[in-house]
Amino acid sequence: MTAYKPTRPVPRGCALGFFAGRYKAEPEDFVVEEVAAYEPCGEGEHLYLWTQKRGMSTLDLVDDVARMLDLDPRGIGLAGLKDAQSVSRQWLSVQGAHEDQVRDLAGNGWRVLRHSRHGNKLKMGHLSGNRFLVTLRGTVAGDLEKAQANLAELTLRGVPNYFGEQRFGKRGANLDKGLSILRGKAKKAAYTMPRRLFGLMISAVQSEVFNRVIIERLATLDTLLPGDLAFLHRNGACFPVVNAAAEQARATSFEVSPSGPMPGAKMMQPQGEPLAIEQRVQAAMELPMEQFAKLPFGLASGERRPLRVPITEAMARQNERGLELQFALPRGSFATSVLRELLEDTIWFQERS
C-alpha cells in the first residue's frame, strides 16, 4: 500500500447520461493502433518494426525484442506506451539489426508484422495519436442509440484530458515515490535510479496536478477565462488570453482550449483565476514547486497541456460480443477519458488495490 493515492477523475457526463458496460474482459475487447507522426522512408541506419502485441506491456515487448536480437533495450526507440490488457499495434526502432533477423520475428504474445528503414531513432511522443476499437460487454437495448448520441456530443465539446491510471504506476506507487523525491525524503535514491524510472515518478506527480486542475475546472473546460494560457491544437503552442470574450469563438470551434499545468522550472504561468486554481491545487498537495528546478536529467522543465481534447472518427455499432466503440484521440490522451464520459462506472485502480 502507498501513502498517497491519485485522485479519481470526475466525469463531466453527456446529456443522455451513462449506461452500463464492461470492457477489457479479454485483450481483444480493447484494440489500439498507433497513428504515426511519419512513416519510415525506406532507408537509414534504424530499422523500424511494426509490431502487434497481446496481453503484455510495451516495456515487456521492448525487453523481449532486445533479448531476441541481442541488443540493449535502452537503444530501442518507441513513440508511446500501449495498454497491457489489449491488442495493440505500434512502431519500434532498432539499430544494429538486419532485415533477415526481424523477418517473421515473434515471441510469446507478440510478432513483427512488417519492417522498414529510417534515418532516426523513434522517441517518445513521435506519434500523431491512437485509434481505438473498444467492445463493451453487458449492454442492453437502447444503449447503442445512447452511445451514438453521447459520442456526437463529445465530438462537439471535447473530452476531459485526464491522465489514465497507467500513468501512476502499480497501485499509484510512482506518484507516492515522486512526491517523496520532491519533498526531499528520497533524494539519494532519486540520483541513483535509472533515468527512465525517475522520469516516470516525476511525470506521475505532474499528472496528478493536471488531473486535479481538470476537476477544479470541469464546468469551464470549453470556456476561456481571463488570464488563461490557450492551447492551439494545430501546433501545441500557447498564448496568454487577455480578452476572453473575444477569443471564445476560437474555443467554441475547437481551434483552442484552456490549458493546465505539467509543473516544471520553465513552464509558462497563467494569470488571474486560472493561476489561483493551479496554486490552490499545488498547495493542497504540499508540493514544493521550487524543487522541480533542482531535479537531475533535465526531465522536469514543464509544459502546458490542453484541459480537453478532440475526439474524431467516433462511431458505435453492435457486434457479436456487445457494443463496439470506435474513436481516435491525439497523442498523450487516454481512451479511459472517453469511456468515463459514457459508462456508469469505470474501474479505477484504487478499487483494485
Image: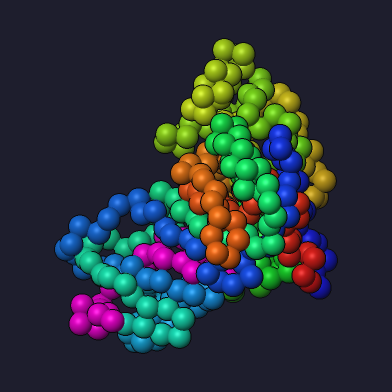
The residue segment tinted magenta is 77-104
Say which residue appears at 42% left-offset and 58% top-offset.
34
173 over 19 or under it: above or below: below
Q: Position of residue 166 (x, y in %)?
A: 63, 63
In-image side of 52 versus 100 (left or right):
right
Q: Is residue 54 above or below residue 163?
A: below
Q: Residue 69: which quarter of the image?
A: bottom left
Q: Residue at x 77, y 70 (%)?
A: 352
Q: Nearer the viewer, residue 107 or 62?
A: 107
Location of the N terminus by quadrant is bottom right
Q: Can the viewer see residue 9 in this picture?
A: no
Which quarter of the figure has residue 136?
Answer: bottom right
Query: Residue 63, percent across and down?
Result: 45, 80
Q: Position of residue 111 (x, y in %)?
A: 37, 78
Q: Nearer the viewer, residue 104 or 316?
A: 316
On screen, residue 309 versus residue 179, left or right, reads left
Give the side of residue 286 with respect to residue 233, left or right: right
Quadrant of residue 296 in the image?
bottom right
If the image is split into quadrants, where does the C terminus sit?
Answer: bottom right
Residue drawn at point x = 31 percent, y = 72 percent: 113
Instruction: Look at the picture and state if 238 lies above or below 352.
Output: above
